[in-house]
Image (tube, helix red, strand yellow):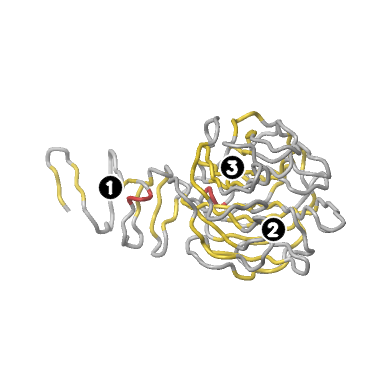
Amino acid sequence: GEYDPHTHSSYVCAGSLEQVSVTGHFSVPNGGINDRQETPIEGTVRFNTDLATLEFFNGVEWRQFTYNQGQSGRALFGGGQDPSAISGIDVLNIISLGNSNNFGNLSVVRRTPGACSSEIRGLFGGGSTPSNSDVIDYVTIASEGNAIDFGNLTASTDQVTACSSSTRGLFGGGESPSITNVISYVEISTTGNSLDFGDLSENKRGHSGMASATRGFFCGGNNPGSTTIIDFVTIASKGNAVIFGNDITNAPGRASSSNSQKGILYSFGDDHKDISSITLASEGNAIYFGDLSIAATRMSATGSQTRSVILLGEVSPFAPTYVNTVEFVLYSSSGNSQDFGDLSRKAKSRGALSDSHGGLGGF
C-alpha cells in the first residue's frame, strides 16, 4: 500500500489486513451495484450506495450486513374477497404459531392487492373493488391502525403483484384493463405515485412476487393461459425483467415468499398441491420442496428469514370454499407444510407482507 504524509491516510488497491486500529475515521470502498468488482476476493467488504448498506463477498455472491432491531417478525394480510371485496387487515406473529389479531383496515375496500414492505412500512397497491383500483396505501407495521393514502399506481390494475427491497417497492403485471407486463416502482420511505420501472418478459396476472436484497421476482400466473415463467429484475436499477427459469407446475393463483437466499413457490392444480423452491442468487428452474395439506388457489404468502407462512385462501375452486387456514414451512429444510393457525376471517386473494422478508436482507 501507500501512505500520504499530507493527509495521514493510507490505502491499498487490493489485499488483506491482519489487524487495524483507527482513532478517527475508516472508510471501506463504496459504489453502486454496477461498480462491484468483476472478480472479487472472498471476504471483500464494501459499502453499497444503491442499497445504503455494507456488503461482503462470500466467495459465491454479494451479501448484505443488516441491522434487524426493527424486525419483529410481523406478517400482515390485507384486503381480499369473502365473496365480496373486504378492507380488513390481520396481523400474526411469524415467530410463534397461533391465530391472527385485528390490525385495522385498508383505505379502500378491495381484493387482489399487491403488497410489499420495508422493515417499517407496509404498502398495499391496486386490486379491484370490483372495478380496478390504482390506490396505494400504507401502514406502519409495528403499530395497529388503518391504512393511509400513499399515492397511485401508473394505471388502475387488478391482480397486480408486488415485491420490495428495504427501500424500493415494485408493482408488476396485472390487468388494466387488458393483461399487462408493466412494472412500476415507489420509494417506500416517501409518499407519492409510482413511476415506470420497465417490463416483465410477458404479460401476466394472478402471479406472485418475492425478493432478495438485490433481486425482485415475479412468478407464474396466467396470460390468460397458465405460465411457469419466473422473471427477475435488479431492484436498485430500472430495466426490463429477465427470465430466471420455470416453476415445476403450470398453475395460476399461486403465492411465493423468500428469505435472503431461498424462494418458496406454492402452486395450485387440479391434482397437485406442490411446493417448490429456487436459489435466488443463481438462475435455474424450481425444484420440488414438499406439499401443502390440501390443494388451494388464490393464496397469499410472506415470511421471515426462517419461516414461510401461507394463507390457503380457496380450497374448492369449482364450488368455492374460502378458508382462513395458515400453514408454514421452514426455508432450511424441505418437507410438507404444517398448520400455523387461523386468520380472523375466511377469505381469498389477500395481499401479504412482513417486516422481515428476504428483500430486507439479513440471515
Q: Is residue 98 left or right of residue 256?
A: right
Query: In the image, residue 113 lies at what x, y percent?
Result: 68, 42
Q: CA distance from mark 2 to mark 3?
A: 23 Å
Query: Is residue 73 visible to the viewer in this orientation of the structure?
Result: no
Indicate the amino acid at tag 1: Ser
Asked which secondary structure carries label 2, the reply is loop
Query: In the image, residue 247 lies at what x, y percent?
Result: 61, 65
Indicate the amino acid at tag 2: Pro
At 40% from the left and 48% from the top, the residue drawn is: 54
Viewer-proximal residue among 34 and 94: 34
Could you classify mark 3 by the number of other residues whose Cα lies within 10 Å: few (under 14), some (14-19), or many (20 or more)?
many
Q: Is residue 140 left or right of residue 44?
A: right
Q: Pick whichever of labels 2 and 3 is earlier in the sequence.
A: 3
Q: Is residue 5 left or right of residue 174?
A: left
Asked which secondary structure carries label 3, the reply is strand
Q: Pick whichever of labels 2 and 1 is earlier in the sequence.
A: 1
Residue wearing tag 3 = 117
